Image (tube, rainbow, N blue to C red):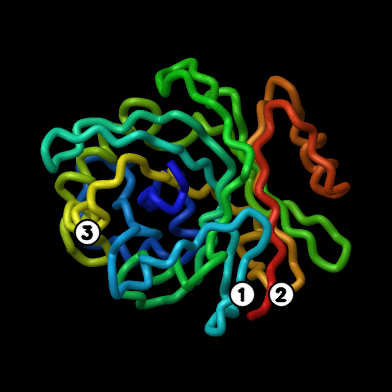
Amino acid sequence: MKLTDMIGLGIAGNFAGHLEQAGEASDFVNVKVKDPAEPKAIFPFYVPNRENSFLNVFPIAHDRICYPDSGDNLQIEPEVALICDIVYEGSKVKALVPREFAAFNDCSIRRPGARKISEKKNWGPASKGLATTRLALTSFTAGCELDHYHIASFLLRDGQCHAYGMDSPAVEYSYFHEKLLNWVVDKMNHQQDDGPAEDIPALLQAARYPQQAIVGIGATRYLPFGEQTFLQPGDESIVAVYDSRLYAADAIRGMAESGEFAEPGISVVRQKVTAN
């Protein structure tokens, strides 16, 4: 399927400490969870076929971020995205089956008091970044390909390369493997319009029950530079998901500095921040 036919979903609070660093923990104070490590909610960033909604605008690009008119507080959100088949039983989601993974920048506007998470996620074309190199998953159980990958991110500004987020193993996600998939399926079937969360079953219906989903599984923690530094036109954002069996973190930073990334075992999305 084309990316434009897939629903785009993200997960809030699946990496310990990120919401606090992003100044968004207070948005979820009234969200009840059974497990302290449980993510807070899923949110839409793209809903195909949903008429008269900003979420109907396809926000993903691989080479640029369009700087919003309102934005002086735009941050990279370095993540892994899963490309998943959606298996239905009637109008209910029976299962998600991950087929591929890729580097993802769930770029966000920090808008204190925003009514819904999605209001910070899609401000038009080129709001998000997804690598063109998508890596195959034969399963999403313990020991799968993704278990060996790390997530790194960088900001290039004025000829200098700055590490933006912590170099993080994918297995450090709070919910991962079958536990994550089961949780997402439950939210796709039951999450309602409540506080910052949205009615996901209604959005799936509005999207005419898409057969695939792009699922960003959560942003990693920031380094102090990333926590304190917002994007500006002229910057370049880099998110790399790389096989730690093949590359050391220092080697990935060297590739970011040079602009030349090796081919095997790396998915990278590089985006120039452009003014409208």
* Residue type at the position of mark 2: Pro
User: What is the quadrant of residue 158 in the picture?
Assistant: bottom right
Toward which corner of the image does residue 155 lie, by quadrant?
bottom right
Question: Relative to the observer, which residue lies in front, 95 or 169?
Answer: 95
Mark 3 and mark 1: Cα distance apart in space = 28 Å
Q: Residue farthest to the left?
A: 90
Q: Is residue 148 left or right of residue 48?
A: right
Classify mark 3: helix, strand or loop: helix
Answer with mark 2 or mark 3, whichever residue precedes in sequence: 3
Q: CA distance from mark 2 to mark 3?
A: 35 Å
- Provide residue 197's location: percent of width, then percent of height: 25, 61
Question: From what the image shows, is residue 155 above or below residue 104?
Answer: below
* Tag shown at residue 67: 1
Q: Position of residue 271 (x, y in %)?
A: 68, 58
Do tag 2 and tag 1 residues touch (Cβ < 8 Å)? yes
> In the image, residue 137 lies at what x, y percent?
49, 24
The image position of residue 150, as x and y in percent, is 62, 34
Residue under label 2, please give it.
Answer: 233
Up-down relation of residue 97 to residue 127 (above or below) = above
Amino acid type, callout 1: Tyr
The residue that label 3 is drawn on is 206
Asked which secondary structure carries label 1, the reply is: strand
